[in-house]
């Protein structure tokens, strides 16, 4: 036990001894609990003693009595309420908390601010050591005063230096004036949760650093500065997001980088993460603006990469739904198509590499043929001149999804047949890469569409399991995919006689991870890192922004790159703006869905500008 805590207990005990009521202090430094009825005003265990100044309480399993003020009631939502020590009873140790959760399933009729006395058992809820200290198995609970007296929340103005620094506030009612940055919104609809950071946008550690010490340090720094704002309920898909200052709509989208202020709630540790269970709606949100038009890039040709999030068209004749992935019915597919087409139309790219399109061949009823028809119809007779690349195969690979290439016939022409490889990891895990030679005037080059194995851990074995280096599962398969891809291209599979090659697509690896570095070490140039001055990202996952989508150019093609950009229409957006009509919220289509570009996918499109004539001076890589 911390000596400071023991001193505070002894001091209280001495005062009661003078009054003729000698307490019995147990070996754990807190009063021994008897079997009789509770008596308000008797010596109780201070909350800071129960909490301690370590990750877990030293009193786990002990029966204690605590007397304090009710700071928040979450009986219906979280199955209990919170207590906070009265002003003046705190200890001098900044590492100890003055609040605690009491698990109590029965309705609590007393208002917030009521002084109560509880007899219960100290416990840690959750997996150690990332657990929450709590009082459980309440045997007695009484109210000590008729008049409630609210205890002011503790003002929190900054984060600590380590994730465990939040432990000092565990169980306390806190207030954050802000502003803090919204870094994650993917769990808003399911659990009513938003992730915020005191340090601006959080980047995936392996986007900024090579896996290792620096990446781990960034992961810790991200965790130290972020909190989850929760709606104080455990049920999924709440019907009402009561804690938002305005509903989730296209006008108030709660994009990543929005600025949040006026946070009022209790800080807890649940599911291994620090959360603020809100007691009042968020005070203010300055909405981050949506980009209104596709970015401009310097160059004579525009080449794009776009993951279209499971574009499956059923049987190609309006039926065949639900499919194994993508839209569940024909109406949902129409909504999905409207968004994808709006994005492709606005991109106005001469060549587009597509990922996550249904792998159902190239007939008139195929998904790629359907997408090209929809796009050309939307663009009209003069601009609707897209065609798709068709290799000499019925389909490429055995996966449900495939890559594809579409292009504008008035801007570029194909030369020779498209080729792909299904060797090694491309036989089952990564999708086979598709390569096509394109010609514009006297300039010709090869575009290769790619989609490597994802980071998900299902069925991962041996070296494909998560190595806990920040690269997730199946990193070994992605590295092997990069190696096989590089070896295949080195054989000049299209027989073009040069190495002007552009690799684009979803590599499912952040910018400093092994697969990307393998290709860079083979001589490919990271065009996005070279040409973008601001930190790049195409995907946001669990509050971390980073690039899963890449444009890597051979050394001979690098001088033709005029610019690169990412169009942030998807990664920063809530999944609530997708085409689905969720069972839990039938009003979503009316309140949120629009046939526009926003959240047309979960990946941002990437755009590259190519010059027909090379630059004489190569650009300086961005820091």
Image (cartoon, rainbow, N blue to C red):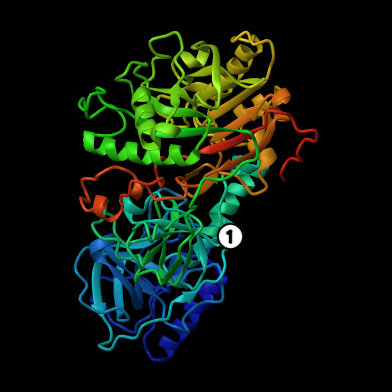
- Tell me what residue is drawn at x 25 percent, y 50 percent: 589
In the rendered view, would you say 182 is above or below 549?
Answer: below
Q: Taking 194 as reference, is 33 left or right?
A: left
- Tell me what residue is drawn at x 22 percent, y 53 percent: 587
- Tell me what residue is drawn at x 24 percent, y 53 percent: 590
Q: Taking 616 as reference, is 322 left or right?
A: left
For the residue carrying disc 1, how many other residues have a C-alpha within 10 Å: few (<14), some (14-19), or many (20+)?
A: some
Which residue is the extreme one toward the front? 382
In the rendered view, would you say 130 is above or below 513?
Answer: below
Q: Is residue 329 visible?
A: no
Q: Is residue 360 visible?
A: yes
Can you identify the residue that label 1 sits on?
199
- Tell me what residue is drawn at x 45 percent, y 60 percent: 57
Q: Give the camera-side residue of 609 and 167.
A: 609
In the rendered view, would you say 43 is above or below 188?
Answer: below
Q: Which of the 4 image quarters holds residue 439?
A: top right
* Residue 260, horizontal then vertical, whole percent: 47, 66
Q: Give the camera-side residue of 488 and 527.
A: 527
Which residue is the extreme one toward the bottom? 19
* Residue 28, horizontal then vertical, whole percent: 45, 65
Local SS, label 1: loop
Q: Give the camera-side residue of 23 and 395.
A: 395
Question: Disc count in the image?
Answer: 1
Which residue is the extreme one toward the right? 617
Q: Taking 300 as reference, is 568 left or right?
A: left
Q: Taking 591 as reference, is 255 left or right?
A: right
* Residue 552, horizontal then vertical, whole percent: 63, 29
* Residue 611, horizontal then vertical, whole percent: 67, 31
In the rendered view, would you say 324 is above or below 55?
Answer: above
Q: Give the camera-side residue of 564 and 243.
A: 564
Q: Which of the 4 image quarters holds residue 429?
A: top left
């Amino acid at each position: 036990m911390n000596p400071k805590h023991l001193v505070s207990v002894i001091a209280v005990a001495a005062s009661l001894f003078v009054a003729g009521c000698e307490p019995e202090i147990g070996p754990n430094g807190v009063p021994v609990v008897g079997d009789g009825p509770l008596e308000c005003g008797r010596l109780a265990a201070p909350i800071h003693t129960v909490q301690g100044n370590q990750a877990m309480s030293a009193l786990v399993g002990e029966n204690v009595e605590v007397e304090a003020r009710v700071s928040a009631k979450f009986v219906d939502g979280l199955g209990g309420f919170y207590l906070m020590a009265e002003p003046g009873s705190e200890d001098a140790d900044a590492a100890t908390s003055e609040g605690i959760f009491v698990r109590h399933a029965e309705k609590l009729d007393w208002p917030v601010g009521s002084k109560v006395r509880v007899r219960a058992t100290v416990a840690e809820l959750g997996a150690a050591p990332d657990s929450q200290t709590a009082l459980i198995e309440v045997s007695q609970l009484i109210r000590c005063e008729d008049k409630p007296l609210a205890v002011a929340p503790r003002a929190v103005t900054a984060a600590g230096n380590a994730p465990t620094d939040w432990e000092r506030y565990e169980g306390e009612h806190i207030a954050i004036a802000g502003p803090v940055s919204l870094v994650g919104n993917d769990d808003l609809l399911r659990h009513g949760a938003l992730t915020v950071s005191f340090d601006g946008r959080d980047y995936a550690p392996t986007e900024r650093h090579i896996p290792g010490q620096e990446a781990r340090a960034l992961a810790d720094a991200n965790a130290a500065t972020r909190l989850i704002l929760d709606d104080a309920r455990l049920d999924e898909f709440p019907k009402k997001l009561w804690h938002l200052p305005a509903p989730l709509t296209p006008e108030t989208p709660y994009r990543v980088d929005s600025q949040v202020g006026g946070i009022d709630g209790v800080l807890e540790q649940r599911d291994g993460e620090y959360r603020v269970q809100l007691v009042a709606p968020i005070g203010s949100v300055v909405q981050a603006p949506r980009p209104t038009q596709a970015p401009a890039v310097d160059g004579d040709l525009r080449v794009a990469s776009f993951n279209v999030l499971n574009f499956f068209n059923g049987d190609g004749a309006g039926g065949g739904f639900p499919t194994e992935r993508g839209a569940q019915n024909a109406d949902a597919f129409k909504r999905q198509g409207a968004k994808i087409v709006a994005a492709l139309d606005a991109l106005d790219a001469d060549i587009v590499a597509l990922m996550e399109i249904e792998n159902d061949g190239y007939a008139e009823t195929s998904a790629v043929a359907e997408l090209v028809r929809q796009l050309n119809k939307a663009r009209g007779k003069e601009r609707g001149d897209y065609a798709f690349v068709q290799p000499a195969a019925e389909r490429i690979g055995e996966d449900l999804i495939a890559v594809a290439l579409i292009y504008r016939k008035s801007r570029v022409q194909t030369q020779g047949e498209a080729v792909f490889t299904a060797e090694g990891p491309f036989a089952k895990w990564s999708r086979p890469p598709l390569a096509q030679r394109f010609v514009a005037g006297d300039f010709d080059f090869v575009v290769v569409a790619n989609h490597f194995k994802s980071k998900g851990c299902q069925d991962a074995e041996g070296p494909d399991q998560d190595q806990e280096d920040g690269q997730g599962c199946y990193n070994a398969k992605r590295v092997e995919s990069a190696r096989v891809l590089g070896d295949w291209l080195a054989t000049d599979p299209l027989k073009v006689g040069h190495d002007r090659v552009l690799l684009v697509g979803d590599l499912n690896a952040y910018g400093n991870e092994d697969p990307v570095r393998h290709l860079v070490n083979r001589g490919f140039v990271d065009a996005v890192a070279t040409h973008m001055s601001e930190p790049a990202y195409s995907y946001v996952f669990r509050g971390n922004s980073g690039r899963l989508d890449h444009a890597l150019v051979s050394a001979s093609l690098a001088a033709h790159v005029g610019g690169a950009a990412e169009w942030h229409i998807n990664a920063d957006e809530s999944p609530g703006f997708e085409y689905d009509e969720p069972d839990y919220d039938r009003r979503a289509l009316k309140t949120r869905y629009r046939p526009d570009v926003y959240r047309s996918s979960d990946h941002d499109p990437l755009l590259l500008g190519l010059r027909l004539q090379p630059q004489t001076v190569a650009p300086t890589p961005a820091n």
